[in-house]
Image: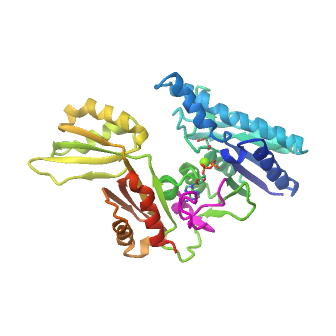
């Protein structure tokens, strides 16, 4: 008998029909002689709808109350799925994140799991029940409800698989696996049979929504192999593991991230300590800075340009304005009309010319590059948002045949 963790995303449990579809997948797995723990997300667009409801009340909601609100979505799904499983003769019990033992730090709306006490899950499995756990949620030290950030149910599933030493962790979604680009936008995107944790982590962090990046981080840390597959089409998906078959591919995928803003501070003094003042102030507010560009000093001053998540741009601007006299710049500019387009592939470590092929594809598509950043296995460019889809298509066809 094996222990299998199966996670189903929002579209997989969107309505009655989909819930029974999931119940059948779970029942089949169990009837084949396995113990099953299921993790589910909120139905369809529920989480977005809840965020909108909060915005109808206030533009500056307490983060604690946001988590109280957002956690309700997953609670609906677990109850409905447990009922559906019972009704088709598969004994099941639903557990909220806290009943399932998830403890987190106190960072409301983007909490990190600090501990997972699996006693309850294990005792329910021992009673021969399928255990249906609400993803995306936990409790902090004050016993307040927290959520793990968008897409956080993936992380809940991987954490359970790691803690229980599950034999398999399957992430069921609405596409058939991990593709070389978002298959909803790039028609000839190719499904990958395998991808390494490192490549998947980059893709997920650079905008490929199919897996949450923290879930991949956790899977790598605890050696949990993942299978990403479709809840609607029962064919093999993509395996995410430590060392993946390269399939002769230099580039594993192209990703786009719209959640980017470029901030420039003009004419800061060209003296030691400026970067520390700027990025220290942003770090204090937990704002992640990504690509940083500094112009060559001229007349004892220079410009400092960098990217932050667009969702943090307003806060970043407020923090910098507050500190501008200390920093010494003359003006701050924010541009939210940008996107980041990236290519990812372990193969580029041992091949030259990958960057120039990417830049050539952009040149031929007449796309202007505003910023560039590279690491061992990825290259990212910041471009105008209006050109991003065209850029992804051009780069994809340059690398993936
Ligand atoms: P779930 O609700 O199951 O968690 P998500 O919407 O979070 O599903 O993630 C699945 C979506 O990710 C797909 O519908 C697809 O549009 C998008 N996606 C983006 N990049 C990729 C990629 N490289 N491969 C597969 N899907 C991707
Ligand atoms: N329901 C949450 C979200 O929409 C968590 C998840 O789907 O993984 O982000
Ligand atoms: Mg998701």
User: In this view of the protein, can residue 375 be seen by the observer?
Assistant: yes
Task: Single out the residue that lies furthest toward the right.
Answer: 89
Residue 381 placement (x, y as % from top left):
37, 58
On the rendered structure, is 195 left or right of 274? right
Task: Single out the residue that lies furthest toward the left.
Answer: 299
Segment colored magenta: 174-201
Using the image as rendered, state which of residue 48 and residue 155 is in the foreground.
48
Q: Is residue 81 above or below residue 185?
A: above
Classify the position of the N terminus by image quarter. Answer: bottom right
Give the dominant element type of the magenta stretch: helix, strand or loop: loop
Residue 336 placement (x, y as % from top left):
36, 43
On the rendered structure, is 137 left or right of 375? right
User: In this view of the protein, can residue 145 be seen by the observer?
Assistant: no
Is residue 85 in the magenta section?
no
Using the image as rendered, state which of residue 338 and residue 113 is in the foreground.
338
The image's colouring method is rainbow
């Amino acid at each position: 008998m094996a222990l299998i963790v199966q996670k189903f995303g929002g579209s997989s449990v969107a309505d009655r029909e989909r819930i029974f579809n999931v119940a059948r997948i779970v029942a089949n797995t169990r009837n084949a002689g396995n113990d099953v723990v299921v993790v589910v997300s909120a139905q369809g667009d529920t989480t977005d709808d809840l965020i909108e409801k909060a915005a109808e009340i206030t533009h500056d909601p307490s983060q604690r109350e946001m988590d109280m609100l957002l956690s309700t979505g997953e609670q609906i799904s677990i109850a409905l799925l447990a009922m559906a499983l019972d009704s088709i003769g598969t004994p099941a019990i639903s557990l909220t994140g806290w009943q399932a033992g998830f403890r987190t730090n106190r960072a409301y709306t983007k909490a990190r799991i600090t501990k997972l006490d699996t006693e309850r899950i294990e005792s329910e499995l021992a009673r021969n029940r399928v255990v249906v756990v609400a993803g995306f949620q936990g409790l902090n030290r004050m016993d307040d409800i927290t959520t793990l950030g968008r897409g956080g149910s993936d992380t809940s599933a991987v954490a359970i698989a790691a803690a229980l030493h599950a034999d398999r962790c399957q992430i069921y979604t609405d596409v058939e696996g991990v593709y070389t680009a978002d298959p909803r936008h790039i028609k000839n995107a190719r499904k990958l049979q395998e991808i390494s944790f490192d490549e998947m982590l980059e893709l997920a962090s650079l905008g490929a929504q199919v897996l949450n990046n923290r879930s991949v981080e956790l899977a790598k840390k605890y050696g949990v192999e993942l299978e990403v597959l479709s809840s609607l089409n029962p064919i093999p998906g993509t395996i995410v593991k430590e060392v993946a078959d390269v399939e002769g591919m230099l580039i594993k995928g192209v990703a786009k991230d719209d959640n980017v803003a470029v901030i420039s501070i003009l004419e800061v003094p060209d003296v030691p300590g400026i970067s520390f003042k700027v990025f220290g102030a942003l770090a204090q507010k937990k704002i992640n800075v990504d690509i940083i560009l500094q112009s060559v000093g001229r007349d004892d001053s220079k410009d400092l340009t960098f990217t932050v998540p667009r969702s943090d741009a307003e806060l970043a601007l407020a923090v910098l304005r507050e500190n501008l006299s200390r920093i010494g710049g003359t003006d701050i500019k924010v541009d939210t009309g940008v996107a980041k387009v990236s290519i990812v592939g372990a193969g580029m470590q041992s091949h030259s010319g990958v960057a120039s092929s990417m830049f050539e594809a952009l040149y031929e598509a007449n796309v202007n590059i505003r910023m560039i950043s590279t690491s061992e296995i990825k290259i990212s460019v910041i471009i105008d948002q209006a050109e991003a889809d065209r850029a992804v298509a051009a780069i994809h066809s340059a690398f993936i045949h």
